[in-house]
Image (tube, rainbow, N blue to C red):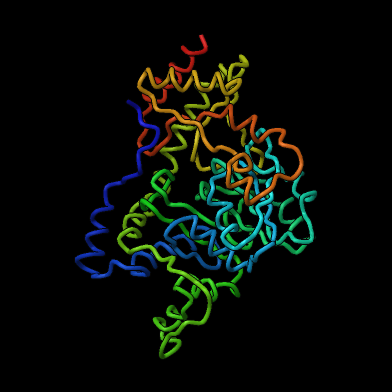
Amino acid sequence: MIDFNVPPYVGTELKYVEEAVAVNHKICGDGPFTHRCNAWLEQKTGTAKALLTTSCTHATEMAALLADIREGDEVIMPSYTFVSTADAFVLRGAVPVFVDIRPDTMNIDEKKIEAAVTERTRAIVPVHYAGVSCEMDVIMDIAKKYHLHVIEDAAQGVMSTYKGKQLGTIGDYGCYSFHETKNYSMGEGGALLIRDPENVERAEIIREKGTNRAKFFRGQIDKYTWVDAGSSYLPGDMNAAYLLAQLDMADAIFEDRMRSWNLYQELLTPLAKAGKIELPFIPEGCNHNAHMFYVKAKDIEERSALIRFLKEHGIQAVFHYIPLHSAPAGQRFGRFHGEDIYTTKESERLLRLPMYYGLKEEQVQYIAETIEEFYA
């Protein structure tokens, strides 16, 4: 069986975890490995501050708090995304306003955003699907025009760029995921990227249960206390140790995944040219991170048959999100603005193929041959 996902492992993770336990004697939050991960992210992305979190979900919750999202506010986002994108704002009492996606990238259609803006709108949340950037110049112009926050859901976008800028650094806040299905993993985890230095102190406070504990440990105050609403968003330092081993090898992981992605693209292009399937589209100015390789079948029936066929041949392939506006909670908490032309239709066609660090060339070839056999 070729698994859909195998969590990344480079070989030095356990050495780092042992160091956290036996040498540092520090396994709770904000230990040496957490600080090293934060520093790596800041150096790599150029953001003012990066803070590891327990998940991308919690990074997005922190962003919602920092953006002062309140009950009755509206937040514009795609419906084709994971539930966490909406949950972070629903928990603040806000209304997710879903707009349609582009069929080429599966990202929010930047041309549909402005029409969804009302006097209650407070933020736009672009989701960089498959690590391919949304049209951020257009989105930032709309945000500037209407004085809106931009919170990038870059869960899948670590090491991806838009016109030379790292995803997660363009909007006010960027949210990364280090879940086991992502390119770089700590099991469960994420990070919040903060663009503007003036927002860093409050972010540290929110992350530390609403206390100014970070300033205390830096020696800036002689005792710490409760100063704001917050929660415990710190991952354990053992998790950070596991992640740092992979960040140390980030370029090698990136190149390995890119080889697999490019091979899929090469081998499946004849089927695409024959009109049997559609392949991912990468717009000009977008450099992706090979987070995902997907194909699009004709419709949901053909996709289901292809999934079954691949499974019969020892290949685990999966569909992806059920659009949030069609889910019970989406209907209860949110609303769809405009017409659903592509969101449902395209989501029902999309099929994700195995993609992970260490996927072998012969496995990619076998998967491509099996898909060819299905269409033959």
Taking the image as shown, residue 312 lies to the left or right of residue 107, namely: left
Residue 339 vertical position relative to residue 167 in the rendered view, above or below: above
For image coordinates 47% across by 81% down, the residue present is 212
Determine the residue positioned at 43% across, 34% down.
355
Return the x and y of residue 255 as percentages of the image width and height: 44, 40
Closer-to-camera residue (164/114):
114
Q: Quadrant of the N terminus?
A: top left
The residue that appears at 41% across and 91% down in the rendered structure is 222
* For residue 89, side relative to residue 42 (left or right): right
Q: In the rendered view, would you say 355 is above or below 300?
A: below
Q: From the viewer's side, name the closer residue of 176 and 101.
A: 101
242 relative position to 134: left or right: left
- Total numbered labels: 0
Residue 242's image quarter?
A: bottom left
Furthest residue to the top? 376
Residue 308 position (above or below residue 287) = above
Q: Relative to the observer, which residue lies in front, 217 or 10?
A: 217
Outermost left residue? 22
Task: Find residue 313 and report its horizontal and vertical position in percent.
Answer: 37, 18
Q: Please identify the residue farthest to the bottom as the structure is shown.
A: 222
Q: Residue at x 72, y 52 (%)?
A: 139
| Figure quadrant of residue 288 | top right
Residue 48 coordinates in the image, percent (x, y): 55, 68
> For this view, does 213 lie left or right of residue 123?
left
